[in-house]
Amino acid sequence: MNQTFYRYRKTLGPGILFACTAIGVSHLVQSTRAGAEFGFLLLGFIILANVLKYPFFEHGSRYANATGTSIIDGYEKIGRKFLILYLAITVASMFFVTAAVGFVTAGFMENLFQIELPGVWAVVILFAICATILSVGRYTALDSLLKVVGFILIISTILAFILALNNGPIEQIDNFVPRELWNDSGIFFLIALMGWMPTAIDMSSWNSLWTIARIKQTGFKPLLKETIREFRVAYIITSILAIMFLTLGTYVFFGSGEELPNNNSMFAHQIVTLFTETIGEWSYIVIAASAFSVMFGTIVAVFDGYSRSLSKVVQIIRHGDDERGFKKRYIILVMILAVGSIIVVFQFGEKLKELVDFATTVSFLVAPVIAIFNYRLVTGKYLAREAKPPVWIKVLSVMGIAFLIGFALFFVYTKFF
């Protein structure tokens, strides 16, 4: 038992980073909005997205453990053009994704500290803090931070969920008419919801990088089944939390006549109030702190993931360089990402929902490409036979690719025709 616990503790890390990245915008914002605006109507879609997107995240962990290299290295093995396409997808989406997560996090920061900063200054301060943390500590700081904040928010969410079930749903106002799903705005929200449910598929490459970083940090090489188990537990918890946030949005807001605000700090206040109305007013500061903490952990993870993956791509294209060159490039990319994302936030102004929906929709539209890359890597000649995924994962992967392509085409048809 002691040996098993020791091995699991040494393996623990990448799954937690993944979970905290996912719990951010997709759960606190999108799942809560889904419940507040549609009730339980989108429950099936949330479950479907979590199930059918699972294999592509596991592929990142599987490839990293089996080969000792990241899945980004694998993209080059199947062809330089695939690596360049991954680079193009990353550059095209990273500023919008980081801006969306940063904007939401800034709202929770203003709510927690009861401050109201003009313009994008809250985002500027937030990004400066993130850049400092990552420039100094990188993976070690990130890993330690998220293990704490993730645990706090998970406990808070479970407690709020149990109390919400006990209290029952809010009484609906007279003549309440639920929002229509099968019109343009409803379909666009559905696509945006699934884009980051539980998170964007292109972030599977981050998971492979975090897996390798954890091995380097601890000097411990887990068995393939241990790496998969650690990730799988985190994924299941993430999926369950998505349903809990949907339930909280439904029980507290659906049919109340209230609308979640479009301003980021007001939205944050409303989300925190959602928890405190079910747990009790005494819990406001605890919930505000844990919600900001998990969002802060998410934005730090986003900065780290994009900068780490882009630095890796450049390293591969340049046919490798030393660790010092990687670190220097990593810090420069953190700065570029911060500046570019601030510009995006400035362009969207106070339109929180529009920014989040745009970023998540972009993620969903590029998802089929990354899904096909990942599936090809773990089922082809690049992994040893014993490291390849079981039949049920392969079947689920094919179903997932069909699901992603189908909904992407459906979105394009609805949008343009």
Image (cartoon, rainbow, N blue to C red):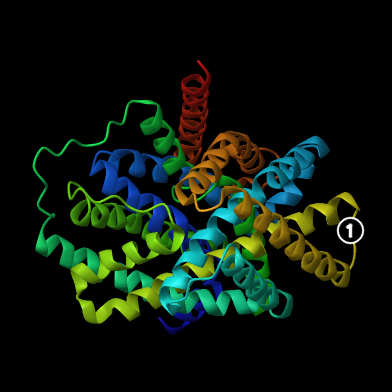
Badge 1 marks a residue whose secondary structure is loop
In the rendering, at what x and y percent does residue 316 appear?
84, 52
The amino acid type, in three-letter code, at marker 1 is: Gly
In the rendering, at what x and y percent does residue 144 appear?
55, 80
> 212 and 287: which one is in front?
287
Instruction: Tell which residue pokes out farthest to the bottom in this image.
Output: 2
Rendered image quadrant of residue 77 = top right
Regarding residue 180, the answer to whether it shows in the image is yes
> 275 and 140: which one is in front?
275
In the rendering, at what x and y percent does residue 84 appear?
79, 40
Quadrant occupied by the N terminus: bottom left
Which residue: 59% across, 51% down?
A: 97
Q: Is residue 416 above or below residue 127?
A: above
In the rendering, at what x and y percent does residue 47 appear?
34, 44
Which residue: 54% across, 47% down?
A: 200
Q: In this view, does 243 lie above or below 126?
A: above
Rendered image quadrant of residue 49 = top left
- Where does label 1 land, which residue? 320
Q: From the viewer's perspective, is 58 left or right of 154?
A: right
Instruction: Tell which residue pokes out farthest to the top in this image.
Output: 417
> 256 and 69: which one is in front?
256
Neighbour class for label 1 at 10 Å: few (<14), some, many (≥20)? few
Which residue: 82% across, 39% down?
A: 80
